[in-house]
Image (spheres, grey):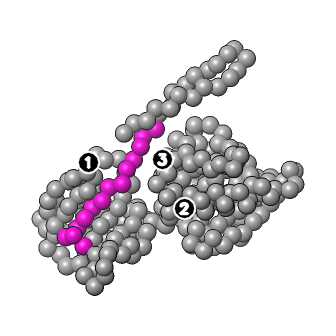
Amino acid sequence: MVKHINIKTLSKNGINSAIETFINDTEIHIIINNYVNITFVCIANNLDCLVYGCLRDINRDDIEIVSMENNNIFVKTKLSKDEVLDVIKQKEIVGTCESIEISDSKLESNKIVIPFNNTRYKLKNDILLNICNDFYTNLDDKRMYYSRIISLESLAYMDCNDTNIKTNIYKILGMSDNTNLLESIILLDCILNTEILQILIRAKITFIIAKQIENFAVLRLAQKFGLTIGYFNKDEVRILSHNSRII
């Protein structure tokens, strides 16, 4: 679904108005033999190609798309559960899908084995608000830029400050464990622009909260890379992209 947002700004010449367009993606579930459920967040088109593409290491003759109902794609294959899991454990799928659920007859309900793509780690809204309140209400020296990286798994955090926002970010990235950045959120005491966003994209941080977003170019770039972007203002956190990250 395409969403249009009308943006109005004040200037010396009066009110300027512009319409920005965003594409809303959705959750797509590929359910294999009723025991494996792979969840992707994407646009709901060419879904048969999505199935064949992510399961391309399985012979296409061994894949049967039974039905597509409300973004649920039911697939049958002759492969065993272990063989299917061996295929979907590939790094490409692990880094792209939202989560993988495996049904086990010994369990009462489905078990989320891993939100394999850690960039999609979900966070409760009240926890996010508390995190932001704690950070943004304790910035003492207005001459400094502050940043904080928080592990979404343990909520442990580290702080850094500098008179230059870029060196501040490089410092806190250097303090962090690179393997955990996909499972982290970064809070920035600055206006987020595309230049800063590109540094964070290269560092594989994809959950970013700032004091302000410079312009819609930031959101377009964030959308391109599937990031969660938001800003904190007056005890409120506003998520501007990929709000599926917040539950």
Query: What residue is shown at x 19% (from left), y 79% (from top)?
Result: 80
Q: Is residue 97 above or below residue 10?
A: below
Q: Which residues are magenta?
A: 22-35
SS class, disc 3: helix
- Where residue 28 appears, x then y in whole percent? 32, 55
Identify the amino acid type marked 3.
Answer: Lys
Q: Is residue 64 above or below residue 109?
A: above
Mark 1–mark 2 distance (CA, rounded to whole Å): 32 Å
Question: Which callout, 3 or 2, points at the residue further toward the start of the chain?
Answer: 2
Q: Which mark is residue 46?
A: 1
The image position of residue 121, as x and y in percent, is 50, 64
Element carrying mark 2:
loop
Classify the position of the N terminus by image quarter. Answer: top left
Q: Nearer the viewer, mark 1 or mark 2?
A: 2
Residue 116 in the image: above or below residue 218:
below
Judge the density around disc 1: few (<14), some (14-19), many (≥20) Cα neighbours within 10 Å: few
Give the residue number, with chain letter if any, for mark 2.
Answer: 124
Q: Secondary structure at mark 1?
A: loop
Q: Circle 3 is placed at which residue position?
A: 224
Circle 2: is it few (<14), some (14-19), or many (20+) Cα within 10 Å? few
